[in-house]
Amino acid sequence: MGNKRTDWEELGLSNDFLFGKVMSNPEICKETLETILGIAIGRIEYPERQKAVDEDKDARSVRLDIYVKDEEKTVYNVEMQATDTRELPKRSRYYASLIDLQELDKGEPYWNLKKSYVIFICTFDLFGEGRHQYTFENLCQENHEITLGDGTVKMFLNTEGTKGDISGGLKAFLDYVGGRESDSPLVRKLEAEVSRAKKNREWRREYMTLLMRDQENIEKGENRYAQLIQKLLKENRYDAIEQAGKDKVYRQKLYKEYHIL
């Protein structure tokens, strides 16, 4: 879950579950995208909340918060991120790749790939420059006037920015996500949609179910780690203990080595 607060009534838009529910309203989703990107979108096709992407049984499966297309078949993936996991740049690369796999059927030419945006709305400054917005496209390192033209855009928004680098509408939106008051037309619509979402008993039940599942997964992970530490201590593998504490890949390798499920 994307927010530390667990009380349904106290959730804000920075919670990924609530964000997904609010953005399931196509008009709200369209206006939010227009505000973020500063463009006009004619219509949005079939908004999907938490779209599951799992192309290969051995590949990592993810659930995308928002996955929509416009009338030009441009793909927009928007993710709410309230915790700095230190892996967002690599996640953006992975998500963009998965989108391409979803959009291109076997045997189709590569030029059929449409433009795609992967957008992370963060409640922290990922790059530490005080900007509200960091946008990345592939450029030639020898000549920045040459773009690769692959049609992929990755954007990281920051609710805690300090520079005057964005429009008033986007600033108002980011302020609202960051828990600050704003009176923009979009924010008023978002507030009404948040209020409506919180009255939905089915969504509340779904949220609590996911919350319990996440807690069970955490407890399971803690038990596995405790078992691993015990086995390593028994064999005096102190270097392995230190490395396992900071290296996820190495930790998974040790789980397999000791057959800890």
Image (spheres, rainbow, N blue to C red):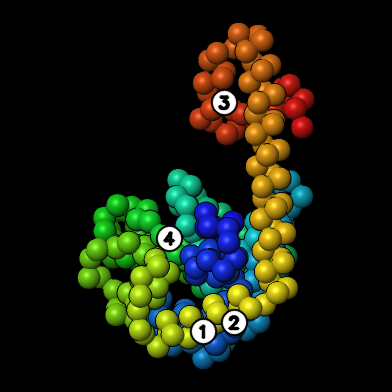
Q: Earlier in the sequence, mark 3 or mark 2?
A: 2
Residue at the disc numbered 4: 122
The quarter of the rendered structure image containing the N terminus is bottom right
Q: Out of 224 and 146, give the one closest to the viewer.
A: 224
Counting from the top left corner in percent of width and height, residue 155 is at 42, 64
The quarter of the rendered structure image containing the C terminus is top right
Amino acid type, mark 2: Arg
Counting from the top left corner in percent of width and height, residue 61 is at 68, 53
**Element class at badge 1:** helix
Whether residue 248 sits left or right of residue 155 in the image: it is right
Q: Residues within 10 Å of mark 2 (few under 14, many from 20)?
A: few
Q: CA distance from mark 1 to mark 2?
A: 6 Å
Q: Is residue 251 above or below residue 168?
A: above
Residue at the disc numbered 3: 244
Amino acid type, mark 4: Cys
Residue at the disc numbered 2: 196
Q: Which residue ends up furthest to the left in the rendered image?
A: 164
**Element class at badge 4:** strand
Amino acid type, mark 1: Ala
**Element class at badge 2:** helix
Q: Is residue 58 visible?
A: yes
Q: Which mark is residue 246?
A: none
Residue shown at the point (57%, 69%) measured from the top left: 9
Residue at the disc numbered 1: 192
Q: Residues within 10 Å of mark 3 (few under 14, many from 20)?
A: many
Q: CA distance from mark 3 to mark 2?
A: 45 Å
Pair 4/2: label in front:
2
Q: Are marks 1 and 2 in contact (CB under 8 Å)?
A: yes
